[in-house]
Image (tube, coloured by chain):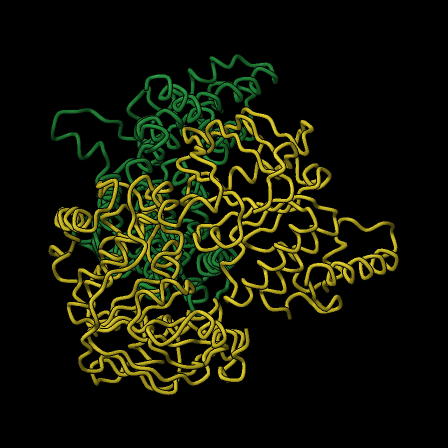
Amino acid sequence: MDKMPRWADVILVPIINIFLAFIVAGLVVLAIGYNPFDMVYWMIKGSLGSSTGIGYTLYYATNFIFTGLAFSVAMHAKMFNIGGEGQAAIGGLGAALVLLAVPWPHWTLALPFAILGAGVFGAAWAAVPAYLQAKRGSHIVITTIMFNFIGASLLVFLLNGVLKKPGQQAAETATFFEGAQLPTFHDMLAPFGIAFSKNAPANVTFLVALLAAVLVWLLIWRTRLGYQIRAFGHSESATAYAGISSIRITMMAMLISGGLAGLMAINVVMGEAERMVLGFVEGAGFMGIAVALMGRNHPFGIVLASLLFGMLNQGGFELLWEMPGMSREMVIVIQALIIIFTGALVNMTRDPLERLFIRMNTRAT
Amino acid sequence: MRPQQAAASAIELRGISKAFGPVQANKDISINVAKGSVHGIIGENGAGKSTLMSILYGFYKADAGEIFINGQKTVITDSQAAIAAGIGMVFQHFKLVENFTVLENVILGVENGPMLRDSLDNAREALKHLAEEYELDVDPDAVVQDLSVGHQQRVEILKALYRRADILILDEPTGVLTPAEADHLFRILRNLKEEGKTIILITHKLREIMNVTDTVSVMRRGEMLDTVTTAETSPEDLAERMVGRKVLLRVDKKPAKPGDVVLNVENLKVVDTFGVERVKGISLNVRAGEILGVAGVAGNGQSELLEVLGGFHKATGKITVNGQEIDLTGKFSDGQSRRARGIAHVPEDRQAEGLIMEFTAWENMVFGYHHAAEYQSGLLMNNAGIKTIAAEKMERFDVRPRNPMLAAKNFSGGNQQKIVLAREMERDPDLLLVGQPTRGVDIGAIEFIHQQIIALRDQGKAILLVSVELDEIMSLSDRIAVMFDGQIMGERLPEETNEQDLGLLMAGITERKGANHG
């Protein structure tokens, strides 16, 4: 019945798209006078060539898994939650408050409470747009964008005021208690005799992200709530017939989405910086949209796409270092090309590929 | 009676083929429609009728084949070319500008100059002639949205004739008409035929084919099977050709044995989101073991009645089920509460309401009942169990293909409807609401669906049937209520009424003695 085998749709199409993106990016690099193969070499070496590189790649990937999952849960209910950026920022506030309030004796105790703080704050930041959408019909795209700005401004206000560490210039909180330090990959792998770079920020939050991906998969495809969220996303009129409350589903999907976005802060605020720094989200909220698009809103796809985008991020930084004259903007151009090809232009390759498969099928029968 | 002019053909198609991806919608189709005849095209949903007509009107380009209009080979690239070739089309869903007057709609696209005055005067003159000639009277200055559906359809015909159409194609023209309006339409068609116009009528109603056509073509699975002279065939014969096997057109049922009142509706009023009162204080009841059929032209409040009973529309009044009042406005006026009270609902629009088209058959099999205890396993849903149950229900309701993993959108209309019926009937409800049970359903499946509804009645369940198909109402119902403009115009017993009687009620005319003319 399906026009194209599923593996082709899920695996082949993204691979072709990434390949196309690299060709176009290569042409751009060629045009400004660099060797495109050098670009690919340094990006891969920079992101996967050393345990430091891998550690950074995984660190970025962790952020994208959370924000990608966040976007996908809302998307299953047909809501375009563009507010991951703000929800992650406010999630950081929640985590920071928890971690500053109590002198935590050990990270195993601190982590669950920090997750709770980040999740609840992130969810709360999504709750207002969700309520306005559910009850008043205010468009979620508009309200969540606005809440990104409000959230950013709120953090500027707090980090320059009550939360700022006394006696310093930078807009950041005091460093958290040492007991709340999360183990890095270096710490985790050392007992097994595996040497992992001490400088890489990848930490135990990566495992939390993988666990979150499994839980989201269970939620969407195995629970009643997930069933209702998907039904609502496909047909609002049918859910009205079935007696599924649109208000409840809108709220639940957005709260879960906001909570997941908030968890991204655990990785950065608790796992890496060990304090909250202004602007720590660094676009990961928006990157989540691209990740979810590429991962087809499926947790497994999102994890894979996050790893790829983590590589691009880390490889891009490496490029700046290794290819003098390569500007930060150029790196962003390359990343943007990949996002365009894997997200926005998916159908460009899918449709011809589908026709190809149909032709092959009709010839076979 | 009249000798066929064998030589003059208005339309001749030779070897038309059209494929959409792997689906062959039209396979090597050849027909010949004589000038000045009424030609019917029948076939089940998806047989390729609409595709063929879309090719003729320039919406699709055929992969192969030739079109001859009046003996001339014609290439129809778009609808402009079709109009130039003298083809006019009346679509099932009218293509009128609702807030324009009739005249403005008629001249739209064929204005002769930048100023409208001339065109409007021309059209007014032309419309006057057409009205006299063909009984096509419409007030030229009326705004289209104020006209009845029957009159809107006349505007569509006028539009085609004003563009000098010689060949008129009508796609399911009577779906939205009362029987009286349909009769009037057929009179118009006969008049047009007398004037030498050629008419192609696409319909799934066998009675209409028998009534007005001279010749009829039967399509099945993209192929043109036969073209026969209408006088030499019968509805049973046509149905068999359409489906490919013998079909029972009548419904066999024993007399009903009505029990206690299950559903009682008193003074029900429904106001829609625009503040318009759609149901104006109706009262009715349905007993156990009987089918109450609600007849009426679409849009006269039947949908709102079903929506209120199904729990997704607010209302005022009093409704009791098994003697207990149900909530019409508050927290318990939703689908879940209705199901808990033993009300099952096969909604009018299965694609928008009854099913999630992207969901698999097994997921759809519990839609609305997904809270039921047997579908849970701890915190998760019991997917494996649901799949097994779904497969059994698909077996019992003969859903084809029998694959619970297939998405609902990949089933045919009839099989989609069987999925909804299986889900709702197998929950053992006290009251079953059924809206348009066989809309867009092929003849073979209609037979099965009707049998299932009768079987449920014979189990002693109360059934409220809403349908715009008068035949269906007449053959299934034990009692018939006719709705017009949000009110019940009257109740009849099927054996004591006929189509004319019901038709008058559907048009809002109650003094049937006075209006009983020939």
**Which of these two is toward me, B232 or A350?**
B232
Residue A96: tell me if it is visible.
no
Q: Tell me the quarter of the image containing the N terminus of chain A.
A: top left
User: For the point 36% across and 36% down, which residue is it?
Assistant: A295
Tell me where residue B178 appears, x and y as whole percent. 51, 67
**Which of these two is toward me, A280 or B507?**
B507
Residue B370, picture quadrant:
bottom left
Q: Is residue B479 above or below residue A205?
A: below
Q: Is residue B408 above or below residue A2?
A: below
Left or right: A260, with A192 as reference point: right
Chain yellow in the figure, letter: B
Residue B118, picture quadrant:
bottom right
Tell me where residue B223 appears, x and y as whole percent. 43, 32
Residue A129, picture quadrant:
bottom left
**Which of these two is toward me, A154 or A257?**
A257
**Which of these two is toward me, A309 or B205?**
B205
Left or right: B468, with A121 as reference point: right
Palette colour of chain A: green
